Amino acid sequence: MPLLRRVRAVAVTSVLLATGCFAATAGASAEPEAPPTTPGCVQPGPTLRYLVVFERGTSEPLANASVAGACGTTTGYYPQIAVAVAVSADPGFTRRMGVERTYSAQQDGLSRRTGAPARKTKDDELGGTRRTAGAVDRTAEQWDMDLIRAAEAHAVSTGSRDVVVGVLDSGIDPAHPDLVGALDPELSAGCTTGVADPAQAAWSPTTSAHGTHVAGTIAAADDGLGTTGVAPGVRIASVKVVDDAGFIYPEYAVCGFMWAAERGMTITNNSYFIDPWVFTCQNKVGQSVVYEAVRRAVEYATARGVLTVAAAGNGAVDLTKPGLDALSPTNAAPEDVKPQPVDNTCLVLPAQLRNVVAVSSIGSEKVKAGYSSYGLGAVDVTAPGGDRKQVPDDAQNGCVLSTVPSGYDYSCGTSMAAPHVAGVAALLASTHPEAGAPELSRMLNAQAETLPCPADYDLNGTGVQDAFCTGYSEYNGFYGHGVVDALAAVRE
């Protein structure tokens, strides 16, 4: 779910591809069709979607046969990482395939009491003055761009059209005047079935403004109208991984990473955590399948030159010592959620995976936002995501202004911080076109403005520290290597 959405009361939140990104045996559709009846299989419903992890090197025919033999139908297969998406109406499908390699997020969303799928309460926190897009310059309201020296950077470079940032999110408004010049429809796709669909209807926003807001921070046009992004000269692609109920299931994210890798994108922005586990544990049944599938997809994308940038989360927790998860499964009915202890083998995905740039959030005073998660070794860099308690002079509020469908609005969250980092990374990639993902990550760290731990982090004036920052000035748990710097990114 998008990270600025509230989960209950707590903020945390078809075609065959010629490129070989995957092989599909069934079309991408909003609701999977029930597999054909097979002798020995039962069809009581509901038809559920599953993620299946095979041994590396498993061929598509072998994977398809294995799924069919377990009373399912393969809808998509990624041979590069040996991960399949399948559907089945047989409740024995997981048992037949093996619990160590099969998982259905949809199944965790079925109420134990009613059997009905649960829906999540959403609050996009778009709480400023929403205005229709038009001929008004609103860059004076973008304190966040001033903080990372974006305007100064644009005097040197606005970025290269050869650089593409994939916005893995809830879709981008294709008609927004600030975004039409940057958005590349040919590279966009919807992934909310686990299988990429390049039709515009599949990647356009439906129930959430989140993706459009993120996109504007990255690449809104520098034309004297509306807002301006960090890297207005680069291209962006809408890769929709958020469904209409607000969930980001693991098969959606896997599809998004694989699409970005096969389409040659430079960077992906991931302002979400993967449902239905706030912390996905590597050693627990079902969750281990999610961890391995997503890990493989990110690893593959990195090998293909894609830098993955992700939000650290809005849970205000030390990611190295999470303690207790009282919100998962995030798609379950309230009566089905049981608090569970989590240790440091349980990670926020994708932010805590290797080779992912994890981003915390600061407000206008360059202090960690109260909601932002943190942790020494878990956070790489920080960026302005906004804080309602850090309000710049003459500003409406302390949140970040950006594009939303047909207009503009403010929002706060690590979701807003991450696209600033993706934008700076895009400027770096434009300046250093030979650099791969590891090099871009190292340059982001090296060019960041270091921020020391605050001497006092008592946000409410109660005399009690609200979080504890460990580390030193050049690298610590609140800010990682520091706040990203757009001007430093474009200097040779």
Image (spheres, grey):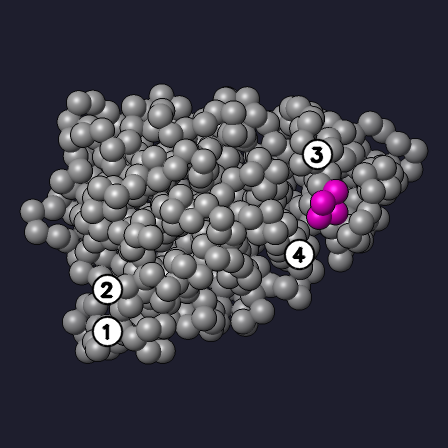
Question: Residue 151 occupies which quadrant of the picture?
Answer: top left
Q: Farthest left residue?
A: 394
219, above or below 492, in the image: above
Q: Amino acid at mark 2?
A: Val
Identify the residue under disc 3.
Answer: 20
344, above or below 296, in the image: below
- Of badges 3 and 4, nearer the viewer stands 3
Q: Amino acid at mark 3?
A: Gly
**3D distance between C-alphas at marks 3 and 4:** 21 Å
Identify the residue under disc 4.
Answer: 292
> Between disc 1 and disc 2, whose residue precedes?
2
Q: Residue at x 37, y 64 (%)?
A: 446
Q: Which mark is residue 454?
A: 1
Residue 208 appears in the rendering: no
> For numbered disc 4, what is the local secondary structure?
helix
**Mark 2 packing: few (<14 Cα in 10 Å), some, or many (20+)?**
many
Relative image position of residue 58 (x, y in whole percent) = 82, 47
> Between disc 1 and disc 4, whose residue precedes?
4
Q: Which residues are magenta?
A: 79-84
**Mark 1 packing: few (<14 Cα in 10 Å), some, or many (20+)?**
some
**Mark 4 packing: few (<14 Cα in 10 Å), some, or many (20+)?**
some
> For numbered disc 2, what is the local secondary structure?
loop
Identify the residue under disc 2.
Answer: 367
The answer to whether residue 80 is magenta is: yes
Contact, mark 1 vs mark 2 (Cβ under 8 Å): yes
**3D distance between C-alphas at marks 3 and 2:** 45 Å
The reply, left or right, for residue 462 in relation to residue 430 is left
> Between disc 4 and disc 2, whose residue precedes?
4
